Image (tube, rainbow, N blue to C red):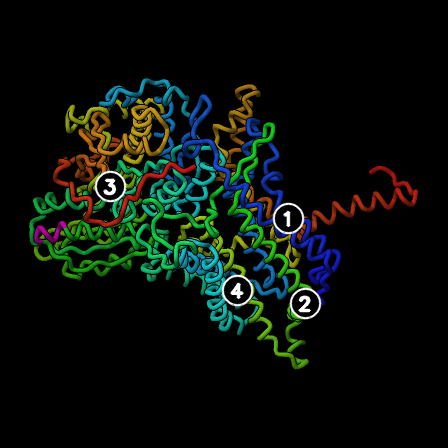
Amino acid sequence: MLGLNKNDMRLLLIVAAMVALAPIILNPFPESSAMAQFNAGYPDLMQRFVIFGIFAIGFNILFGLTGYLSFGHAAFLGAGSYAGMWMLKLLSINVIPAIIFSTFIAGLISLAIGWISLRRSGIYFSILTLAFAQMAFSLAASVLTPITGGETGLQTNLNDPRVLPSFLGGGASDGGNIPKPSLFGMEMTASFKLPVAGWEWTFNWGYYVCGVIMLVAFYVAIRVFRSPFGLMLRAVKSNQQRMSYTGLNTRPYMLACFVISGMYAGLAGGLMAAMDPQVGAERMQWTASGEVVLMTILGGIGTLIGPVLGAGLIKYFENIFSKINSSLLHEWFAFLPDGLEDFIVAIIYPFIGKGWHLTLGLMFMAVIIFLPGGLVELGQRIARRFGKGRTANATGETKPAE
Amino acid sequence: MSKTNMTRRGVLKTGTLAGAGLAVPTIFTASSAAAFTNEPTGSSVTLGFNVPQTGPYADEGADELRAYELAVEHLNGGGDGGMLSTFSSKALDGTGILGKKVEYVTGDTQTKPDAARASARSMIEKDGAVMITGGSSSGVAVAVQALCQEAGIIFMAGLTHSNDTTGKDKKANGFRHFFNSYMSGAALAPILADRYGKDRKAYHLTADYNWGYTTEEAVRTSTEAMGWETVAAVKTPLAQTDFSSYVAPVLNSGADVLVLNHYGGNMVNSLTSAVQFGLRAAEANGKNFEIVVPLYSRLMAKGAGKNVAGIFGSTNWHWSLENVGGAKYAGTNAFVQSFGQKYGFPPSQAAHTTYCQTLLYADAVQRAGSFNPCAVAEALEGFEFDGLGNGKTLYRAEDHQCFKDVLVVKGKENPENEFDLLEIVDITPAEQVSYDASIFGGDLGSCNAGA
């Protein structure tokens, strides 16, 4: 179906189910329980999960297939955000022009940057992309202030023109307030809350818009991976020189791949602007480029689902772990005797709250050392273990307990 | 290419699915029963304290958080009550806000607008915060203020000094207690003209971001009105740590005053660099070379050490204000005492403004009798109060900016201890730093209660 084989179709359906049920899956703990702190099923974070999922999927098309490590993808994310934001300001508060235009602009910019950077490979390519991204960041933060809003960033305003007719989302003001980004009248922030027993599930409209776009992006990525074009990219990864010697010009393939990847980043950027109308220059900083590399490696390079998992994990840490403060820790360990409580809190404290980077770093090291294939490899190992157990039982063989 | 087979059954199936899909949005339109976003229904109310815990302003953020915790303690009837006893409005009685116990959640803004908004959104969407406050940078304040406006939440700005927060980017749901660049310029200029003369030539080093621009402009305008001349204004990157290349050309530029439009770590580094280059001891145009720092804070003075001695600047509040200015500034000592008792050192101006903001919000809710942002905003607009350490203060209705006296301070020559770093030179009365609400443009819009 849809031009996919059975396995890929199953993967797509699993991802679709996960996206659809995320508000339920991500809220495993009842509202009133002490563990509710670890719930991630609120709109902002769910939107971030899928948006960064798109970003990482796109990055993986470049890095996973061709092995070209770009350190400048944040530039496309940021450019997409600014482009989307300007559409929200000038044209209409409807998110569709914003999303289309952001993808388009990011495509243009990645074409220009790719044109130059792809003349080199390996570390030189990485450094070139990094240089371009830092350049874009500095431009956005200072020189281009009239376009980017500088350090304060860009927001929607009461005096924006929004020239389209109002049924297409035009119009500057909504009863003295700035209108919120919407899809034909459905505001991105609109949510439907469903209390079930102790739980409260929030189904957010904006999240589902992002979710559907993520599924389309995921589907396109599968098609790219399985296409002859994808095969060509894999060949570049295994031996680019040999390809050149056989008379194939790899540059058009690489450039196309780079642009596709950049457009994914732009799409993610446009969605970020559409979900939360504020763009800051730090979205282009090299740390943001590094983050997507981490996401992809953490999840599993070159796998389809890996980058999405990696993106989810990093965003979870950033938003959930960073919010645990010492008074919460004391609350949790209050059942222990005083001295022991202070001792345990003192040990855990550096790893939570503002120390969440430390925890993430340790985990990243553990994954690199023990699971070079990322979270996907972890899943495969578990599946293999259970799979083995099943076949062993079926053949009647018994294995000594380990 | 893939082949498409159309069957009657297939078309029906797809049609049903598409129909169901299209019908989904209608369940989202069901409006909830709450009158406004995060209406507190239980026995407690949650406030969101969004401060920088990492990054260049982490020191200020930590001090803000201490003040918030103190304010919550006082609102819930704990401690010695701090400024509740001196505050001119007596609506608060130490039983929380409207009888609900005050609870709080904290977040890290990282001094990045994006991170600050993510943190604020999680407070609103996940923790049900009814008010967001904090921040130590104007970029963050403007970003979070816009978010709160959109979500239907009150935003009580923390340390933000740019004119834009209550100027170009003002919002109906946002309120600022702290002073701004314009007031700094207006308060400083007369003192500078008095001490250094009216025929000075100034050289500006300006942090290359929004706050730097408005501060430079404010100081330029008000000093030029006094007869000063501006020789040059050079922008320095925000992330700069070594300012020697920026300071080196100053002495030969013909200027005899250096204005450092820097804050936090920037100011500490640039000032140190300027002193190392011997600017303090130098003479230019037959006059002593002078340095001015428009926005001062005790934490910065601490960082720059004895380099701040004799350097003028302005500040929103200082812990010695009541001792110097007298009973007019009641509240200062009460606050310093209860802060000192809890943490062992005097509060910074960042701590003071955030403590005041929390109290002002709680008081407005109490007087309005509701947590509804529109009712709270109405209670705050045009509110005149006293006893929060700054003397008589007005929350102006037109731009949600507080108007109060501004302090001109000078780095102490011989500090007695590590907290006694600034000396109050002059207290500029509020009338002298007031301006017309329309000069910065912008539009408040109308209040948004969300939901």
| Image depth: mark 1 or mark 3 in front | 3
Relative to the observer, which residue lies in front, A117 or A95? A95
Residue situated furthest front in the rendering: B8
Q: Are marks 1 and 3 in contact (CB under 8 Å)?
A: no
User: Given the image, what chain letter belongs to the residue carrying mark 1?
Assistant: A
- The first of marks 1 and 2 along the sequence is 2
The spot of residue A123 in percent (x, y) is 55, 66
- Determine the main secondary structure of the stretch shown in magenta: helix
* Residue B247 can be seen, yes or no: yes
Q: Let me know if marks 2 and 4 both belong to one chain.
A: yes
**What is the three-letter code of the residue carrying label 4?**
Ser
CA distance separating discs 2 and 3: 59 Å
Which numbered marker is on residue A227?
A: 2
Q: Let me know if marks 1 and 3 both belong to one chain.
A: no
| Image depth: mark 1 or mark 2 in front | 2
**Residue at the spot of label 1:** A367
**Residue at the spot of label 4:** A126
Relative to the observer, which residue lies in front, A208 or A323? A208
User: Given the image, what chain letter belongs to the residue carrying mark 3?
Assistant: B
**Residue at the spot of label 3:** B399
**What is the three-letter code of the residue carrying label 3?**
Asp
Above/below status of B270 relative to B343: below
Please report the bounds of the magenta region as a residue range.
B222-227
Q: Name the residue at 34% across, 41% down.
A: B136
Q: In which quarter of the image is the C terminus of chain A?
A: top right
Residue B332 belongs to the span the image colors magenta: no
Above/below status of B80 relative to B113: above
Q: How crowded is the residue under tag 3: few (<14 C-alpha within 10 Å), some, or many (20+)?
A: many
User: Given the image, what chain letter belongs to the residue carrying mark 4?
Assistant: A
Element under label 1? Answer: helix
